[in-house]
Amino acid sequence: MPVYRDEAVVLRTHKLGEADRIVTMLTRAHGKVRAVAKGVRRTGSKFGARLEPFMVADVQLYEGRSLDIITQAESLGSYGALITADYGSYTAASVMVETADKLTESEGSLQQYLLLVGALRSLSRQEHGSHLTLNSYLLRAVSMAGWAPSFQDCARCGAVGEHSAMVVQLGGIVCDSCAAPGSPRLDAATIGLLSALLTGDWEHAAAAPERTQSQAAGVVAAYTQWHLGRGLRSLEHVAR
C-alpha cells in the first residue's frame, strides 16, 4: 500500500474500539486527513500524546481502504499541554480547530495549515490575548476561503468613504444606500479594531478598550458563522 509523510496539526480525535483512535488532521500538503492511530490509548503507546488536539507532528501514513493508518508520529509543536492549561486559550483553540475542520477538505490548503499552526503557537506562548488571537484567526481564515470582509469601502457597491452599517450577508461594511433599514451600526473604534485584527496590527488591537473588543468579537462570530453556513458549537464556551 502507498506510504506517505506529511506535517499535520490534530483537529479532533474519536475513540475506535478498545485501544485505537480516529484522528482528524489538517496536513501541510494533503489537506484534511482522517486516519487510524492503532493502540494509542494504551499506556505504553509510543506516540499517543503526539496525536492529541492542537499538537503538530510529522506523521507517516499508509493508505487504507476507507481510512489511512498512522505508523509514525514525531512531535513538531507540543502546543497541547500549554493551551489546555489556560481556559481562555483552550476555548479559543477549540473554535480554531473546529473552523479549520469546516473550512478544509481533502485538497491541499497550505495557507490554512500555516495560519492555524501560527495561531496555535501564538496561543501556547500567550503572545496576545486569546480572544484577539481567535478573532484575528477567524477573519483571516474566512478571507483565505474566499469571503474576505470589507471594513472600509462599501462591500456591495464599492463606494469609498467612512461607512458604519454592518451587513454580514453582504460582506462587511456597506454605505447608507446599500444598507437595509435597521442594519446594525458600528462606531469607528470597532471598525478600526476589525481592520487591525484582519491585518495583524497587534499594537492597535491590544490598545482597544474592552467594550470595543467585545463588540468586534460579536461581529467576527456572526460573520464567520454566516459564511460557514452553520454554527460553531465550541464558540459558546469562549469566555467573553
Image (spheres, rainbow, N blue to C red):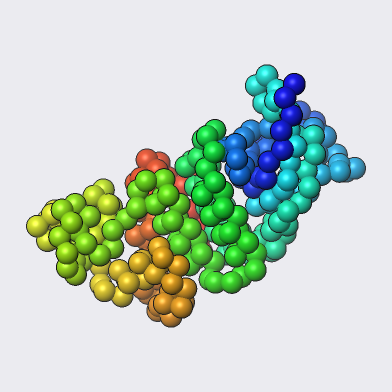
Q: Residue at x 63, y 38 (%)?
A: 24
Image: 197 above or below 63: below
Image: 2 above or below 210: above
Q: How many numbered tags mark residues here?
A: 0
Tell me where residue 155 appears, x and y as whole percent: 22, 55
Q: Of 225 and 113, which appears nearest the observer?
A: 113
Residue 50 showing in the rendered view: yes
Image: 146 above or below 83: above
**In the displayed structure image, the side of residue 142 where residue 59 appears, left or right:** right
Residue at the extreme right of the image, as rendered = 44
Q: Residue at x 45, y 62 (%)?
A: 136
Residue 193 lies in quadrant = bottom left
Residue at the extreme left of the image, as rendered = 177
**In the displayed structure image, the side of residue 64 where residue 139 appears, left or right:** left
If the image is split into quadrants, where does the N terminus sit? Answer: top right
**In the displayed structure image, the side of residue 206 where residue 125 appears, left or right:** right
Tell me where residue 102 appears, x and y as whole percent: 48, 41
Q: Residue at x 43, y 80 (%)?
A: 207
Residue 87 showing in the rendered view: no
Tell me where residue 48 appears, x and y as whole percent: 79, 44
Image: 81 above or below 68: below
Q: Residue at x 60, y 55 (%)?
A: 117
Q: Of 149 and 225, which appears nearest the observer?
A: 149
Tell me where residue 32 appears, x and y as whole percent: 58, 37
